[in-house]
Amino acid sequence: MAKVGVYVCHCGSNIAGVIDVEAVRAFAETLPEVAVARKDLFMCSDSGQEMVKKDIRDGLVDRVVVAACTPRTHEPIFRAAVEKAGLNKYLFEMANIRDQGSWVHSHDHEGATEKAKKVVASAVGKARNLEPLEDTFVPVTDAALVIGGGIAGINASLALANMGHKTYLVEKEPSIGGVMAQLDKTFPSNDCSACILTPMMVEVHSHPNIEILAYSEVEDVSGYIGNFQVKIRQKQSYVDWSKCTGCGDCTQKCPGKAPDAFNCNMSNRRAAYIMFPQAVPKKAVVDIEHCLNCAGREIGTQPKINEKTGRPILAPCERACTAEAINRSIAFDPQGAIKEIEVGAIIVATGFQVMEKDWFKEMAPASPNVVTALQMERIISATGPTEGKLLRPSDGEKPHTITFVSCMGSRDEHFHNYCSRVCCMYMIKQARLIKEKYPDIAINMHFIDVRAGGKGYNEYYINARELGINFFRGKVGGMELLPGEKLRVLAYDGDTASNIEYESDLVVLATAIELPKDANVLAQKLGLQFCGSNFFRELHPKLGPVETAIEGVFLAGCCQGPKDIPNTVSQAKAAAAAASAPLSQGKVRIEAVISEVHPEVCSGCGICIPLCPYHAINMTTYADRPRAQIEMSACKGCGVCTSACPSGAIVLHGYEEAQIFAQIEALTA
Amino acid sequence: MIIDQKKIDEAIDTIIAHGGEYIRECVQCGACSAVCPGVRAGFPLLCRNLIRHLLNGQLEEIIEDSSSWGCQACSRCTEVCPQGVRPQEVVFAFRRYQANQLAFSTSSVTSQMNLFETGHAVYVDPKEARKKVGLPETTPTSAFDEQAKQEIQTLINNSPMGQLGLF
């Protein structure tokens, strides 16, 4: 016979304010096989845990039920206490009388008390039938994959590599750097973005533990924590990167043109291009869609021969390349190549995109003088389309009045309800950079309110006021396009409750940060979930900000939610630390609450295989017959297979039939 | 101004009961007022400022204000509102409250009378102007159609408007 100890928690007034704790305790004493029933103000406190441990050591109890809060946060604490006292940690059961009791029935003290009694009786019923279980361990591949080479991925990779772990950094563009590489200067210290980013990019490139896989995308992921198998597609660059020196000669000679995405499509680049001057790796790519196939040199064909000289006629890019990295006679596979790697942990740092201006019809998006803030970054950047000169796109003239419009698509129920968090600050930054350089330009900034919550941010904002930048509390309602490509701004000053109307030469829209469109595809491959704001969902908004529901997969940067560079770097380093834990241990613990197939009962029907959300079940042979088998390191103990098995051949340890029936019996008594 | 929760609740409940059901969503960004032709024309208590006063519980204090009758029902406020407040509905709800309390501005009485008599809230005798540009003197609308006028008057007499005793 079991000796069950029941411990009822007051949780201060959280439980005791609604539920009669003494009545629940006294009721528990009357239940079969209950040896002791006690109560405490805070069961999770040292004294509460000590009470449980003492009863175990004294031989009074060999099963423990704590009636308190949620197992999600507190089960590990009590299991550890039980284990310390020498009892198997799976001989513990939790009754949730707070989240599912006092909190939801706060207006019905009597009903809540009665419900608590039932919940405790159910837990005791299960506890009487509990059996000891043992955790197992699986070995870990000491390598990590970081997806995305922006400032988040760069920092995560460097942190992991410096801890001694082999790190693969996958970047879909030809160069790492991400959006930060497009920025001119960064708030609140006005450092030049490239000046602080480029050295880190070079460090990543030269780090012995980091392998950059640029111009590559994750094709497929399988496996589980400690043992992920990842297929990576290295896109076709049509340039032999092992020979390319990044000299840029091919980009000078190439006559093919395409919109330059790095400059937000405000200028053209060549079809043979290097992404930007500080690119890492600095390698050329031939954009085959915009390639003109000069001299009839289609990829994979032999060159024509010049009749006079007898020499082959090559395309300009080939002729320009002294490193012989471009050879159009090679029959390149347009699909590129697949590289397979094994890693123990994955950090997703895929970043964000900003909304395009075309979404905002009331803001005259057709005018070239209405630009997104990211376009403005390129306009004021020394490497941008105007080489840093502030010229308005329509006619290349210097603007006299510039308008900044906040919250375009953020805090707007038509688009995104969330605040994009960085817009107020980057608008102020752009305004300051312009005002410092051109004090004669009038700058009007329109905000719902100024959000300057980071370290040093409010000081930065006040300084902008001191510089003579005009701030208005009120959202811009619309723009009217006037002759001469000017814009009439229809705004409002909430403080004086009067409308504002003036003509502006250049309008900057602070468009919202959102998850890139292709993030869905990656989410499917990894099994990532989305949060209400449609970013990747972390395990817990406060206590698990870099973990995900998939063990061994972590998040960093804006793919988890909008954030500035300081927060992104912090989160990247945190994700690296979290990912390093299993890699440094060399093994991961597999909890015992997982499913197991009894092969002698299994009929081999295979119903369970497609149902398993973790792809943990496969077919094996047992006594010459096909049988289901569960890979225990991949099983998460969700129980779907157990409930679906028509033969009752699958047992979920910790939720066995006898235990569940005992619970039902207690609840229906 | 004294903030009194009872007055706030009363003001908001009144507006919601009269059709301004999303007034609580307002974050006072002012986009509505930025595009409002009434605000541009100088009516002080429209859109953002009207909603602010109502959210402060200042319902009775502003009952005599005539701004709400400056609303042209263009709906631009509702189009630009990022919170789905539908400010025009709030303005109309306030108008209905004013009307029920018989707190009309003279400008509104004129337009109500116009509506009753001609079917047009804003009515200017068109004959002279139309003649000048060579159009038929009368318009093919209720203003010159006895049967249509009677139908409109029947409708008004049988609606809450009819109970106001204006006609």
Image (spheres, coloured by chain):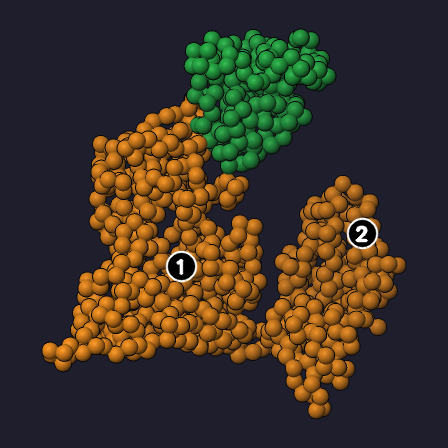
Chain colours: A orange, B green
Residue B87 location, x and y as percent?
A: 55, 28
Q: Is residue A582 above or below residue B49?
A: below
Q: Chain of mark 1?
A: A
Q: Is residue A94 left or right of residue A460?
A: right
Residue A105 location, x and y as percent?
A: 75, 45
Residue at 27% x, 46% y is A379
Residue at 53% x, 31% y is B78
Residue at 47% x, 54% y is A515
Q: Is residue A42 left or right of residue A321?
A: right
Residue at 78% x, 62% y is A123
Residue found at the very far left of the displayed protein: A308
- How packed mark 1 is, by other alpha carbons closer than 10 Å (few <14, some 14-19, many 20 or more), is many
Q: Which residue is mark 1?
A: A152
Going by the numbered disc 1, the residue's amino acid type is Ala
Residue found at the very far bottom of the displayed protein: A624
Q: Is residue A499 above or below residue A263?
A: above
Residue A241: tell me if it is visible.
Answer: no
Q: Is residue A666 left or right of residue B30?
A: right
Residue A535 location, x and y as percent?
A: 51, 54
Q: Are marks 1 and 2 on the same chain?
A: yes
Q: CA distance from mark 1 to mark 2?
A: 48 Å
Label 1 close to label 2 by CB (< 8 Å): no
Mark in front: 1 vs 2: 1
Going by the numbered disc 2, the residue's amino acid type is Lys
Mark carried by residue A536? none
Mark carried by residue A115? 2
Mark found first going from the N terminus, 1 or 2: 2
Residue A459 location, x and y as percent?
A: 35, 38
Q: Quadrant of residue A648?
A: bottom right
Q: Quadrant of residue B107?
A: top right
